[in-house]
Image (cartoon, grey):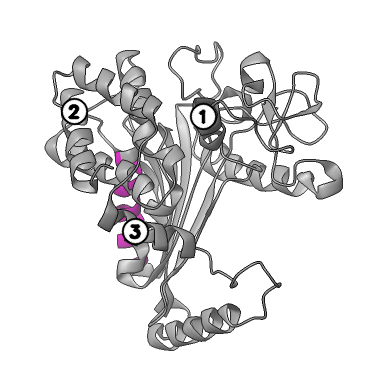
Amino acid sequence: MFSREFLENFCRDVFLGMGCSEQDAQTAATVLVSADTRGIDSHGVARLIGYVRLWEAGRINPKPNIRIVHETPSTAVIDGDAGLGLVVGPKTMQIIMEKAENVGTGWASVKNSNHFGIAGYHAMMGLQKDMIGIAMTNASPLVAPTFSKERMLGTNPIAVAIPANEQPAFVADFATTTAANGKLEILQRKEQDAPLGWVQDQDGNATTDANALKSGGALLPLGSDRVHSSHKGYNLGSIVDILSAVLSGANYGPWAPPFVSFLPLHPEPVGEGLGHFFGAMRVDAFRPADEFKSHMDNWITRFRESESIEGEGPVLIPGDPEREMEAIRNKEGIPLLEPVINDLRQVAEKFKLNF
């Protein structure tokens, strides 16, 4: 087990070694380790070596000039200057939260960024100011649209965080695929099969091979196949891609840059870097915040009390599993798989750090 503090300090030192400022290094480390703490191991320190390799390949700018390139009182287009998405995301949320404080809501589409960690971290930033936070991003093209053999979309997650009063906040954070690619990577490290419905092979056939992507296969949209409404997952992933990238001027669809450094960038890009989309809505722009949060408590309580299927346990509210895991791991520590530990040792050696 590793403490959150130890992993954050280690990641911070790695980002400092990449040339990030003290503040950006700490922000990036906090965002990254928050994933492990919340039980989303696929997007935590297991990704650190990937960021290092992107930096080595010249695809991450450790000292970006993150700036607004177009704006109105409630909207902005942000140029991330090829910075870490772990830094671009929080800075963008701060910008649109200031807009929301002034005019009720704030919205930003981001271009020229990189992988931003878990979407939920950014969406939850709004909770501290009684705002509803929204975060989404396009990603490496690994997903085949319904009826396609070609990889056209990313896992394109959506996160929405909504404040309550006495109840914990409602936090939905989910990929628009049946499973995130990071979960497939965990199965690969464990040398286990994938559940049926997660991936298809290069010919479009369902498979349980966790390594299917390495031989030309693809992840599947939420729903897995047409009979189980994969077209709805395809729709959701497309909406994220358009808001994050077409709207901002980032690369979209199959032109989105891959997260892994050994794959080349598209030879004919249609935009700049990866794209994100963020929203912040002040609750009291719609109704008094205390009144709204009281009704959110009522909503959450009633859903928790709904009759559950025998043997399935209580009905959960989005955010419950992550919140419970966070409490456990803050107390007991964060477990890491041996392949992840080996990767971190490799990173430590590269930057002459103690691990």
Q: Earlier in the sequence, mark 2 or mark 3?
A: 3
Q: Which residue is mark 1?
A: 190
> Against 79, is 94 above or below?
below
Q: Quadrant of residue 123?
A: bottom left
Q: Disc 1 residue type?
A: Lys
- Residue appearing at x 38%, y 60% in the figure: 124
Give the residue furthest to the front. 311
The x and y percentages for residue 111 are 44, 35
**Disc 2: which residue:** 355
Q: Horizontal and vertical percent for residue 145?
A: 74, 34
Q: Camera-side residue: 173 or 101?
A: 173
Q: Is residue 96 magenta?
A: yes
Q: Is residue 129 visible?
A: yes
Main secondary structure of the magenta stretch: helix
Tell me which amino acid carries mark 2.
Phe
Count residues near mark 1 (Cα–Cα under 10 Å), then give few for <14, some for 14-19, many for 20+: few
Mark linked to residue 328: 3
SS state under label 3: helix
Q: CA distance from mark 2 to mark 3?
A: 23 Å
Say if residue 125 shows up in the picture. no
Q: Is residue 259 left or right of residue 202?
A: left
Place of residue 206 in the rendered image (x, y in percent of width and height, measured from the top left): 79, 30
Vertical placement of residue 311 versus 73, above or below:
below
Q: Residue at left 60%, top 27%?
A: 141
Q: CA distance from mark 1 to mark 2?
A: 22 Å
